[in-house]
Image (cartoon, coloured by chain):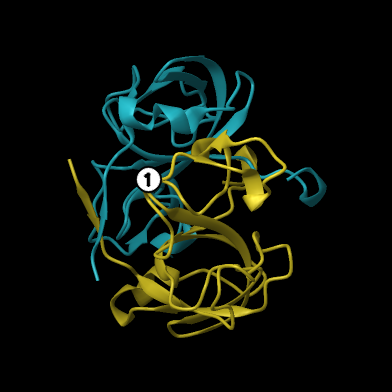
Chain colours: A cyan, B yellow
Amino acid sequence: MDIELSPIGTVESPLTDRATAPKQGDEGAPEAELVLRAEVAEGLDGIQPGDNVIVLTWLDRARRDVLRVHPRGDLTRAEQGVFNTRSPDRPNPIGMHVVEVVSIDATRVRVRNLEALDGTPVLDLKPVLRSVEER
Amino acid sequence: MDIELSPIGTVESPLTDRATAPKQGDEGAPEAELVLRAEVAEGLDGIQPGDNVIVLTWLDRARRDVLRVHPRGDLTRAEQGVFNTRSPDRPNPIGMHVVEVVSIDATRVRVRNLEALDGTPVLDLKPVLRSVEER
């Protein structure tokens, strides 16, 4: 079975090069914008500046034929299965990023702590899950 | 641009009905198994019983044409944009589940706290991110 996804938007970021981008958003990523398609803008309703949001992206510059990697590309560390690492290289290269919303202007969501490269397709946004009592 | 995913495996679970399944894995989900395709088994290398793992699934019984929902299906709560909820109904219905690995037998990974329904395609596994010093 194959599954078809259609991006809900695109990342606009000063980051353009995988080799020099931070490996995680809390390792020095600059502010970036999620530019959503107008057709899905309604889905943002309720999201506020200051919220922590999980962004799922399609890591379109990743390799899909890799099953083992050195963690963080560090050749001194033993190879691991990709499912035990956060490597972008994996059979379905879906990126998962916890970001903080800075501001929202219609379909543009400005965020902190996103290490995705400029032009990366955005697949989904989800709230960080609160405790059982607050859901 | 359309994106094609190919599942890495399938969920085997006693849960078969969305209406009666827990809404989150920590709300009473039974043990379940992730049955991976033999071609990707190598990607599991390094995952151990006791590990917390993030499972991404394809919520194949979700609606993709919904942009606003009542949180948790509770009609007494105001509608929200789907990107501000964990509703399975959303343009790209990718499920995100934090589970605990119970045991691994070749391509079968037994887990706790998975609320996905039996037969749900599995897209990816990732480790829960540790603190910056421990990555």
Chain on which label 1 sits: B
Q: Which residue is mark 1?
A: B91
Q: Determine which quarter of the picture holds residue A100.
A: top right
At label 1, counting other C-alpha atoms closer than 10 Å, the crowd grade (few under 14, some 14-19, many 20 or more) is: many
The residue at the point 50 percent across, 69 percent down is: B46
Left or right, residue B2 beside residue B135: left
Locate residue A40, reporting x and y percent.
37, 32
Q: Position of residue A117 (x, y in %)?
A: 32, 29
Q: Quadrant of residue A115?
A: top left
Image point (65%, 42%), residue name: B131
Please determine whether, in this image, residue A73 is positioned above or below residue B103. Answer: above
- Which residue in the rendered view is the most extreme toward the front? B75
Q: Nearer the viewer, residue B78 or A69?
A: B78
Q: Quadrant of the C terminus of chain A?
A: top right
Farthest-out residue, right: A133
Instruction: Using the rendered image of the protein, determine whether residue A37 is visible from the camera's viewpoint.
Output: no
Residue drawn at 37 percent across, 76 percent down: B41
Residue ID at (32%, 30%) = A39
Question: x, y percentage for residue A25?
Answer: 50, 31
Q: Nearer the viewer, residue B124 or A83?
A: B124
Residue B98, image quadrant: bottom right
Is B108 displayed left or right of A3 in the figure? right
Q: Is residue B71 left or right of residue B62?
A: right
Relative image position of residue A10 (x, y in whole percent): 31, 29
Say whether residue B74 is visible: yes
Q: Secondary structure at mark 1?
A: loop
**Amino acid tagged 1:** Pro
Total marks drawn?
1
* Quarter that holds the N terminus of chain A: bottom left
